[in-house]
Image: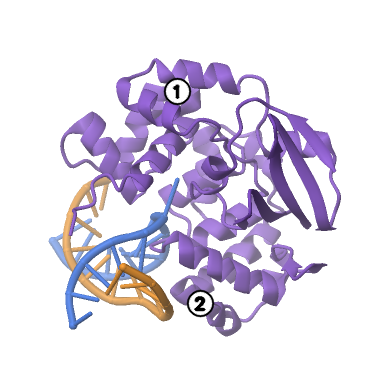
Chain colours: A purple, B blue, C orange
Amino acid sequence: MVILSEVEFDLFNTFENGQCFRWYPLDDAYRGVVRGSFVEISKKNKAIAINTLAGNEYDEVFWHKYLTLEGDYQSICAKLVHKDEHLRKAINQYKGLHLLRQELSETLISFVISANNNVGRIKKIIRNLSEMYGEYLGEGEYAFPTMEALAGASVDKIRSCGAGYRSEYIVKCAGKYLNDNMNSSILNNATYQEAKNILLQYSGVGPKVADCVLLFSGIKTESFPTDVWIKRIMEILYFEESVNPARVSEFAMEYFGKDAGLAQQFLFHYARLNKIGVSPK
DNA sequence: CTCCAGGGATCAG
DNA sequence: CTGATCCATGGA
């Protein structure tokens, strides 16, 4: 059992905001698989308790980093709150929303699957994929498949997981990842634009998926993924007209700076929960 | 039945 | 370079 003290951390706002696909609620806690570790995470008063149920055991340092609990979270939020009225509302309403530093290979494959898809189906496909190609950890849970397993998989078998036309992208992507000896330090040591250009060479990866990978694996905090939800809410809040996704990201990175990624996640969560821009039936 | 989902690849111009 | 079209799948 690992105990972490943190005043501002919310399980729902962190795990239900579309950045991750392997966490699910159980009673007052959340359960999920992270790097071969099946854990249950819960709040005890103001502390975070992490109980390993199967697989690898990790220490405080590991979970502190995964959950982005470093001390500047409060000051970053405080800075963003003063940015403008819209962000103030989103941040105050969804306090304790943290970005996660997820494994690069898992984030890459997960967001290749996310293209033109919905969160419920993405989760189902990833669960199927893990059961078929991931290591069994115990308690009915499987690790996310290694790139070796996916690169050697048959496209038809991956299609049977429900991945549809993305099945081919997954195998190609994993193959190139291995061939390139890709890892997070390569992207960490590159500039934002260099890192993005590297990811854009992978099949199934376009501007939006590349930004998601850079942000949700904790590599580039300034990354501002523009999907249909973010596009809608940004057009309403900041543009008041229809705008190209590339322009949205460009504007946001200039406007929010190094913390654009966290701002984006608050706005995404806000837009989705309030169905901003979705015409009522 | 149609429309939509954390878009990308491909092709036309 | 920008813009249109097609792409599996399942739920609403």
Q: Chain of mark 1?
A: A
Going from the N terminus, do you reach mark 1 or mark 2 first?
2
Q: Name the residue at 36% across, 27% down.
A: A89
Residue C1 at x, y = what percent? 27, 45
Residue A268 at x, y = what percent? 40, 42
Residue bearing mark 2: A162
**The disc labelled 1 sits on which kind of residue?**
Gly
Helix, strand or loop for disc 1? helix
Tell if the residue under mark 1 belongs to the same chain as the one under mark 2. yes
Whether residue A211 is visible here, answered yes or no, is yes
Residue A56 at x, y = what percent? 85, 54
The answer to which of A166 and A187 lies nearer the viewer is A166
A192 is higher (above) or lower (below) than A177: above
Q: Name the disc covering residue A257, or none.
A: 1
Q: Residues within 10 Å of mark 2 (few under 14, many from 20)?
A: some
Residue A183 at x, y = what percent? 70, 47
Q: Is residue A102 left or right of residue B12?
A: right
Q: Name the residue at 63% across, 72% down.
A: A129
Q: Chain of mark 2?
A: A
Helix, strand or loop for disc 2? helix
Q: Residues within 10 Å of mark 1 (few under 14, many from 20)?
A: some
**For residue C9, which quarter of the picture?**
bottom left
Q: Is residue A186 left or right of residue A202?
A: right
A21 is higher (above) or lower (below) than A187: below
**For residue A38, which quarter of the picture?**
bottom right
A183 is higher (above) or lower (below) than A2: below
The answer to which of A33 and A217 lies nearer the viewer is A33
Q: Quadrant of the C terminus of chain A?
A: bottom left
